[in-house]
Amino acid sequence: MPKLRLDQAPPATLPLRFLLAMPCWGVAGAVLLLADGDAALLTRWHPATLALVHVWTLGILGNAMFGSLLQFLPAAVGAQLRGWQGVPALHALFNLGVLLLVAGLYTQARWPMLAAAMALPASFLWLGTMTIPGLLAIAGERLLRAGIGLALGFGMLAALAGSGLALLLARRIAWPLVAVDAHAGLGILGWMVLLLATVARVVMPMFQGAGSVPSRVQAIWLAVVATGLLAAVVAHLRYAGDRTLPLAMAAAGASFALGALWLQRRVPRARQNALFLHWRVGLLALVLAALALAAGQGMVAGALALGVGLPMLVGGMALEIVPFVDWIALRRRVPRGVQLPGVQRLLPDASKRRALLAHGAAAPLLVAAVLWPMPWLARLAALGQLVAWSVHGHALASALLAGRAFLRRVAPHA
């Protein structure tokens, strides 16, 4: 397991701007569902559904993964970020692209989709140019570097595919449905699940006390999933309606979730903290999503994976990363001899558990609204999402406020 390199961690504002955008997009998704609860959960092709899916995949999950990578690569892997001074512009470009895409999909307006088709792939390519050279330059950690590199590559492919689809839609050209499926497979399995599985090799033992997968097993898994995904995408594009891609996604997602649950089995009760529980719930939701996808229940699978499982995983990690980043910032600003508060004091486990409880209460409402599509139930699910992401955002903000309060107390002595 790699050692943390705190001196190489980037300035706190770089990852924080992405991580703090995540709950804001969660609230935006809840408002969208509240406004269109009678249509948003009926079919994957409704404009409100397409907008909501991209709020989840790009606004919530995209911001969380961009921010986590910007912190994880220098501090845990030792990879230097190239041109890190441009991160504020990258954050603005990415979130503007998400906003334009969501607005364009929702209103079917042409110019927002054209602008988003340029901004979003540019954001992923920019992230790649900022991170991949540093990954290639460092020695050691070959498995970690390979997994992150593969995930970044699939993320860029997914962004380019999505850009092409947005251009077609903006020009009122019918989507090839198989291309939409390929775009989803590259983004969800190739970018999100591969990156989470790679990072989990470090964060699960470090933050949860879980076991780790043997290097050889993880290398084989990465190779099988990456090559299998590419083969399944090609088959799906060639043979329209082929079941290879959804089955490949279900198998890979289930193998990741079941493997991580297996690693959690020996975590002692004393270490079964909020992060452990976030991951336990999120992984169980991914297993159910894989079963639903294999059974042909795409809407249910999407709600479980994109609305519950993956947000639980990245949201739980954000509740650890934000106070840790704030603690590093305090360490750099406070003079030697002044005792710093512990990371757990900046954001106590009780606050994290409140966020977990809020998300846990909202999750069954969302799934029920998909299974029994009624406007009142969809709007109840929207209210659950609104409360959950508001509680989550409050928890993240409270960690930063605790750090600022500490600085004010020690300022006269600095």
Image (tube, grey):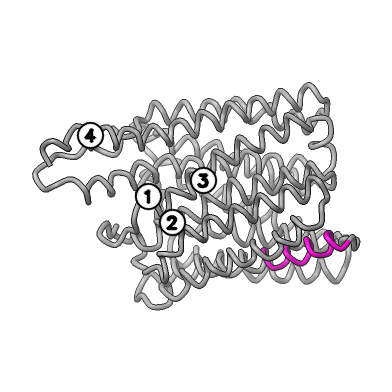
How far apart are labels 1 and 4 at the CA level?
35 Å
Main secondary structure found in the magenta portion: helix
Which label is found at residue 314? 3
Q: Secondary structure at mark 2?
A: helix
Q: Which residue is mark 2?
A: 201
Q: Which residue is mark 1?
A: 205
**Pointers 3 and 2 in contact (CB under 8 A)?**
no
Q: Secondary structure at mark 3?
A: helix
Residue 403, percent across and down?
29, 37
How far apart are labels 4 and 2 at the CA level?
38 Å
Q: Is residue 160 magenta?
A: yes
How far apart are labels 1 and 3 at the CA level?
16 Å
Q: Secondary structure at mark 4?
A: helix
Tell me which numbered mark, 1 or 4, is placed earlier along the sequence: 1
Mark 4: give few (<14), some (14-19) or many (20+) Cα within 10 Å.
few
Which amino acid type is marked by label 4? Arg
Q: Secondary structure at mark 1?
A: helix
Which amino acid type is marked by label 1? Pro
Residue in view at x 36 percent, y 37 percent = 400
For the C terminus, the image quarter is top left
Closer mark to the observer between disc 4 and disc 3: 4
Closer mark to the observer between disc 1 and disc 3: 3
Residue in view at x 45 percent, y 41 percent = 265
Judge from the rendering whether residue 51 lies leftward or rightward of residue 325; answer left or right.
right
| Residue range (magenta) | 159-171
Q: Which residue is mark 4?
A: 408
Residue nearest the observer in this picture, 334 or 322: 334
Q: Is residue 161 magenta?
A: yes
Tell me which numbered mark, 4 or 2, is placed earlier along the sequence: 2
Closer mark to the observer between disc 4 and disc 2: 4
